[in-house]
Image (cartoon, coloured by chain):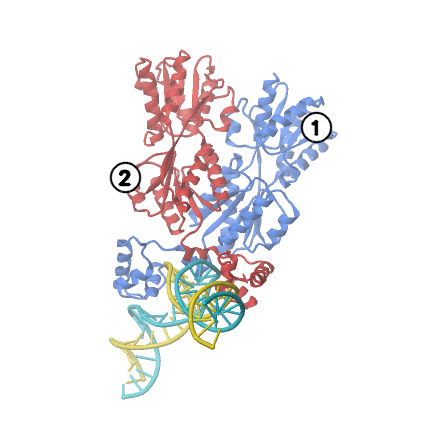
Chain colours: A blue, B red, C cyan, D yellow
Amino acid sequence: MKITIKDIAKKANVSTATVSKILNNKDERISKKTRERVLLIAKENNYIPNLMARSLVTRKTNTIGLVLPDITNPFFPELARGAEDKANKEGYMIMYCNTDDDAEKESSYLEMLAQKMVDGIILTQSANKEGNVESLNKLKIPLVLIDRDINVKNIKGKVLVDNFSGAYEAVDYLIKKEYKKIAYITGPLSTTTAIERLGGYTKALEDSGILINFELIFEGEYKAQWGIDGTNELLNSKVEFDAIFCGNDLIAVNAIRTLKEKGIHVPNDIAVLGYDNIFLSDMIDPPLTTVNQPAYKMGYEAVKLLIDVLDNNKEGKTIKLKTNLVIRKSV
Amino acid sequence: MKITIKDIAKKANVSTATVSKILNNKDERISKKTRERVLLIAKENNYIPNLMARSLVTRKTNTIGLVLPDITNPFFPELARGAEDKANKEGYMIMYCNTDDDAEKESSYLEMLAQKMVDGIILTQSANKEGNVESLNKLKIPLVLIDRDINVKNIKGKVLVDNFSGAYEAVDYLIKKEYKKIAYITGPLSTTTAIERLGGYTKALEDSGILINFELIFEGEYKAQWGIDGTNELLNSKVEFDAIFCGNDLIAVNAIRTLKEKGIHVPNDIAVLGYDNIFLSDMIDPPLTTVNQPAYKMGYEAVKLLIDVLDNNKEGKTIKLKTNLVIRKSV
DNA sequence: TATGTCTGGGTAAACGTTTTCGCAGATGTG
DNA sequence: CACATCTGCGAAAACGTTTACCCAGACATA
């Protein structure tokens, strides 16, 4: 049913080689007459090249895998969009996968992507288990890490954000605003992002001579529900606090909500500071003061980096993007 | 470098046919000895099948295309997630594309997907232009429409939501709550969703004997910015109103925000009712009363439907999902 | 005339699988 | 013993491209 290069060749009385060359603009020595004839036939018959056949010989699929924890977490659509925009611009398509931070799902996806012969993979690595890194090492596909850092061999590049300074700046801002008892409701400390932010938090306190109180630190997940649960844990713990620094905006938004429900005013009673600057943070009441992460840019740069390595054989590198504090009304 | 079926055959002293059969569990007549030997060699050498080569002969890629307007619109991550979950469960992967409701981008993507030989496409159709439908008709790939309806020939199924009754129920609720002058800030009337919702809006008013005032209807985009702009247009128009029904939650949230900034209280002065029930609608102040659309389910069902047609050659059909009104505090 | 140089293509292998037959030897059957 | 039936596997084509070489004729050159 579908027309192939062979059919065109037959109709045009030339060889498939000639057709291929013409269709790919590969051989300028072919006469204008032949060229136009072939092109016309192709168009008339609505020829659609079979990219699988091509990929089989060129060993290039123009496809890249995007592996992330959960597209439903509002940080990632932005990232995915940035990635897709750049990919599309360069003639690539994206296969996307949700790992739910599950190591098994992740490695299953990575294997599937390998089988599909994607040219490269962009990965927000999930839970950092040993077996996982092991399987990553086996992977022969160029890998660009995004958001979360790990130690793997065949990494072609990384796009990271300076989580330490992001958190430092945030907590420092709280301190400058005279908050002294700053709680921290964090995401899972198995992720490098959470660890680095914790580092920024503690360093900022130290630098201001504030003693770190580990009873103020609550570890959970980067999810909305944890914003509620973490805040309740904090409230029930009876330890005094005047501000909450949150692992991400999803947590922060729900912390605010939980506080409001208990009749606690934000920011007059308690200040809340978030992380990510998802679009939603500007739409709540009070608008959330938060650390802006350039999610779109991260995705965009990751794909750019990957393609530079793939097609323009540039050196892999690490890009470290800056955060900035977005001051609104929750502090 | 990468090991192929040929290498395995050589090492095991069998033919590639045998290896293929064993790896695919296709021929029980092969002796246990040979079977185990081949399997062992494959495992030892970390064999990864080349799915492109396979697809070339089987004419099956186990890939489906997901074409939607913008993953950044919070309605779509849910949908995409539903689609991906089901796809993954059935051994499919998803290529995703953002069209920005741009007809050219859409048809360019559709062509790319065709070249990649995806087995099927799930499409939220963008602006409904003639040329577009034309090119859809040419497409030989099974198509499942989601969210927005159009008239195309080779449709294998549709997953729609009853927009009419969703809007009807919403507006009727407003009327029952004694609101009489209900403004409507809608998305683009080039989409079937907007048209149907408008139908529900007018019908509900009619049924209550309320005259329809077209000065209360403002058409724009399904975007946050339009929530701000539309509300301002409404306020500046000096026409009286006591409630706003919004084309989606993104609009509603920003309508509330705009109203609040002007010192207008929601819902005491003006009621606001949204559409979609994106997660964010529960997190703002006041929590948004809105029409719930089962986004996750839509994605899930669309993939299910597609795969049923593809693999279980069932009949294509139209699934019409129900909405339900989620009553919170903005009315 | 013999040689060289363009011009305009064609030949055929290769990419890594799957799949349709078919075949040789072993075993059973009458 | 002659024949049929199983058992276990292999040969080779096919999927739709790309690409490294090669080649035949036309024309120019010495």
Residue B227 is situated, as x and y percent measured from the top left of the image, at 42, 25
Q: Mark 2 points at which residue?
A: B130
Q: How busy is the neighbourhood of tag 2: few (under 14 within 10 Å), some, or many (20 plus)?
A: few
What residue type is disc 1 on? Leu
Per the model, the C-alpha gap separating discs 2 and 1 is 61 Å
Q: Name the chain under label 2.
A: B
**Quarter where residue B193 is shown:** top left
Quarter holding the C terminus of chain B?
top left
Q: Nearer the viewer, mark 2 or mark 1?
A: 2
Relative depth, front residue between A137 and A312: A137
Q: Can residue B160 be seen in this view?
A: yes
Residue A220 is situated, as x and y percent measured from the top left of the image, at 64, 33
What residue type is disc 2 on? Glu
Q: Is mark 2 on a helix, strand or loop?
A: helix
In the rendering, which numbered label is found on residue A216? 1
**Quarter where residue A21 is shown:** bottom left
In the rendering, which numbered label is found on residue B32? none
> In this picture, is A137 found above or below B256?
below
